[in-house]
Image (cartoon, grey):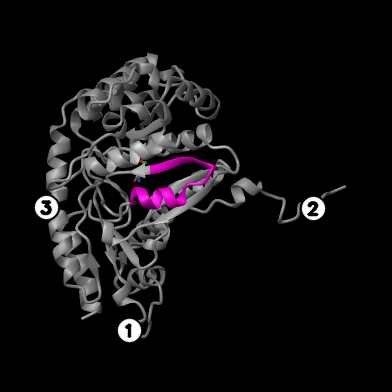
Amino acid sequence: MVVLLDDVNRLSQRISAVSESVTLAIDAKAKAMKAAGEPVISFGAGEPDFPTPVPIVEAAIEAAKDPKNHRYSPTSGLPELRKAVAAKTKRDSGYEVTASQVLITNGGKQAVEHACMTLIDPGDEVILPVPYWTTYPELIKLAGGVSVLVDTDESTGFKATVAQLEAARTERTKALVFVSPSNPTGGVYTRDEIEAVGTWAVEHGIWVITDEIYEHITFDDAKFYSMPVLVPEIANQCVIVNGVAKTYAMTGWRVGWLIGPDDVIKAAGNRHSHATSNVSNVAQHAALAAVSGDLSAAAEMRATFDRRRHLILDLIDKVDGMTCLEPKGAFYAFANVKGMLGREVQGVAPQSSFELAEMLLEKVKVAIVPGEAFGAPGYLRFSYATSDEAIAEGLERIAKLYA
Ligand code: PMP
């Protein structure tokens, strides 16, 4: 007898609730259009456009030749890489951890997933400031958690205040997601603000998942601080997400890490041992070369991003109806486009930033991620980790359309 599966029960409820990453979907669409010969300019993907620095690539080539790396290795990461990440963390942020507190993951993204699956029980509430990085609400949902959104806007530099966090807190609050510098806004919390948030979390026994992936990309007087360095009491209820992707132009290598108390890292490592086993040895050796080397290539890239940041801000300013708060970190400009909505252009009048992004891709072949992907309609996120020429041409096409 053939039993027909009905549409409702075919997939698990857990997975059915999760949506595709909009940022990666837009990037894929732009790349497909480009491959079909269309002159697409993409501000979509959050990845540096530079090649990975040569010494890192060479370390990977050497690693690939060594038969030792053709075999399984310890599931929580190569011991030398866990040690090097601990040393790099002390060097860069001043936070002292042991190698056993470091779990090597498939990118920072998997570190976020492990953090959610290790800390969140079904029904637990997680405070998530908006605009958020698109992956957070989906992974919280996968873990059975409930995101409690805290809206922010230009008035606070897209940063959540302790008063807002306190208003969102209930007895079910398990954790806070804290991302600074921020994707998508480029907001960077000050030392005092981080201290205040950390102190509040300690006071109320709330875990903090702190995402440090953009630690080396800050501008002007903005400075990165690691929360457990400013608030040492939080060490036992804090996990750090980080990785090599943004600092060393290594998005495709897929190496990140989760740092936390020993019991959390041991538990997350158990899960990792079943879900993943070790991260690719070749990629881990590349990451080892990256974190053990100096930060000169990162400094050069940062200087280039800073130049492009000024360029894109100037050009956004020239588009009628578009404004942008100056980002202080990462490589995103989060432009307010509310003044462009409802206006008719070439026969269409986009009513939302989502429709506006669709229209811009269609009419002028410019790919930008709509704010809806980050819980913040009315905005467009431009990744300016692309060439000066592409920035100039892309913004010119939009400005012309709205002239
Ligand atoms: N955190 C944030 C805030 C990010 O923007 C990203 C990448 N877009 C990541 C984590 C994960 O980066 P990866 O998985 O490439 O290491």
- Asked whether 52 or 260 is in front, the reply is 260
Stretch in magenta: 160-177
* SS state under label 2: loop
Residue 223, given in percent of the width and then of the height, sits at 18, 41
Look at the image and tell me whether residue 270 can be seen: yes
Amino acid type of the residue tagged 3 in the rendering: Arg
Label at residue 241: none
- Decide if ligand 1 comes within 8 Å of the CB at mark 3: no
Mark 1: which amino acid? Gln
Residue that carries the numbered disc 2 in the rendered image = 4
Residue 301 point in image, percent of width and height? 16, 42
Q: Is residue 161 left or right of residue 5?
A: left
Q: Which of these two is toward me, 101 or 361?
A: 101
What residue is drawn where x is 34% and y is 20%? 82
Asked if the residue under mark 2 is in contact with the one under mark 3, i.e. CB atoms within 8 Å, the reply is no
Q: Position of residue 178 (x, y in %)?
A: 36, 43
Name the quadrant containing residue 194. Answer: top left
**Residue 21 in view:** no
